[in-house]
Amino acid sequence: MTDLISAVQQLSNPRIAVVGDFMIDRYIFGDAERVSPEAPVPVVHATAEQDRLGGAGNVAANLVGLGAQVLCCGVHGADRSGEQLCDLLKELGANTDAMLECSDRPTIQKIRVMARNQQMLRVDREDACALSAASEQQLQDKLFAADWDAIVLSDYGKGCLSHEFTQSLIAEAQRRGVPSLVDPKHKDLSRYANATMVTPNRSEAEWSAGCPMSSLDAVKQEGSKLCVDAQLQSLLITLGAEGMYLLDADGSATHIPTFARQVYDVTGAGDTVISALAISLASGYDSITAMHLANAAAGIAVSKVGTTMVGREELLRYLRSSTPAGKVVAETDEQLLAITEHFRLEGRKVVFTNGCFDILHAGHVRYLRAARGLGDVLVLGLNDDDSVSRLKGADRPYNKLEDRAEVLAALEFIDLVVPFADDTPESLVQKICPDVLVKGADYKDKGVAGAEFVKKNGGEVEFIDILPGRSTTGIAERIRESN
């Protein structure tokens, strides 16, 4: 997993063109506590509304979040929603020079009514007729005149990507020697012939194959056949809880399990997958590394409600939190500040505590779990070996820093472990500026390093009772006595 963390850190900032069906995803949030007297349907009391980029727009948002320079190419109606769509894209920092206004069709909207994070109803506003020849030519001219290092075809079957237009774009990518990726919505995958990678989900792949893929063996067999028959360079089938399967034209096949911890909503997950694949391939990574990064990004996407972008910092933090080694961040690492700042941007309450944690015992575990309960994120400052020796004696620590850090990082309620060299964590506290500073209750009358700074900056200082009879020193003494 450390290799994946390094891969994310070394992603470049390629120019990627996103072509396809751009839309607005409108969410109406509320509560459903009764049934309508007019019909047997729930009554949703709306409390909030939110507009997000959907379809190809969500692909663009994810690519921008991952660090790409994005050129958007598609159509929208001559309506308020079309203006809003372009405004949202511009706010992201995406280039909308290749977006075309069409008066003969509305801007695509998908309106979802949500109650307690469950989708109750969806209303679609769209006209899925094919683009006129003139509009298609305008889009092609804009796109062919631009510079890009990869192209993503986000095909939602709403009329923007005809067979001929699709093939001309894939051929242009081949001519330029850059990757072309397709999120398909058509049964006949041969319309995407010669694409670098096509990314159907399982049901879409079954539809194209004309048979069920009820086992991983069936996915491999039927997917490989699809890849060859449609003349694709590679086919990546997303399998939900079973992960992803990558089939190449040369007959090679690779399966990886899902990265998702908890699934709330799969809406837009395919957009996140193809975005991560595109920026990875455009950055020069092989398809296997690209698949692993896309799998991790999808794990974040499905843990959220609705269409949502996954940013590079968020992906880095997710990868770090998924492995003990990844949770350990040096005090001097600039990533530390980036990670803690990202916590705040997400509105998460940061808790900080510190200690030697030489021999981890039940008292430590209860203390740390209680500390995590005071906020949303727990950052642990860990004394390095020299500072432990100064504080505890020349025979300490019993366990070296690397071992202590690995054990602590394996605890799910610890989000970051930051080793520090000073006798107190004062400077580390000032770097992180936590919302809550935590120490054991035995420090109430001793003074807590960093307490004044935290209070001055609007934070809190909390004390947690220590579990009696548990200590590293006591454990060591009992071991000596038993020998």
Image (cartoon, rainbow, N blue to C red):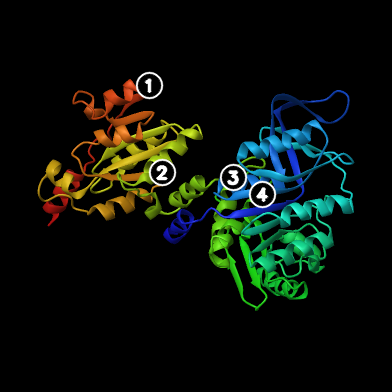
Return the x and y of residue 449 as percentages of the image width and height: 23, 30
Ranked by sequence position, the earlier of labels 2 and 4 is: 4
Q: Residue 282's image quarter?
A: bottom right
Q: Amino acid at mark 2?
A: Asp
Q: Quadrant of the N terminus?
A: bottom left
Residue 146 picture location, percent across and down: 68, 54
Q: Are marks 1 and 3 in contact (CB under 8 Å)?
A: no
Q: Amino acid at mark 1?
A: Gly
Q: Which label was assigned to residue 415?
A: 2
Taking 277 as reference, is 423 left or right? left
**Between residues 481 and 43, which one lies in front from this camera angle?**
43
| Residue 481 appears in the picture as rendered | yes
Please tell me how crowded label 2 is: few (under 14), some (14-19), or many (20+) other residues with Cα within 10 Å.
Answer: many
For label 3, the SS is loop
Q: Nearer the viewer, mark 2 or mark 4?
A: 4
CA separation in Å, label 4 and label 3: 28 Å
- In the image, taking residue 179 as reference, residue 384 lies left or right, namely left
Which amino acid is tagged 4?
A: Leu
Q: Position of residue 423 (x, y in %)?
A: 18, 39
Q: Is residue 47 above or below residue 223?
A: above
Q: For mark 1, give the secondary structure.
A: loop
Q: Which mark is residue 441?
A: none
Which residue corresponds to mark 3? 303
Q: Position of residue 176 (x, y in %)?
A: 66, 66
Q: Secondary structure at mark 4?
A: strand
Q: Earlier in the sequence, mark 1 or mark 3?
A: 3
Q: Earlier in the sequence, mark 4 or mark 3?
A: 4
Q: Would you name the residue on which mark 4 appears?
A: 71
Q: Say whether marks 4 and 1 touch (CB < 8 Å).
A: no
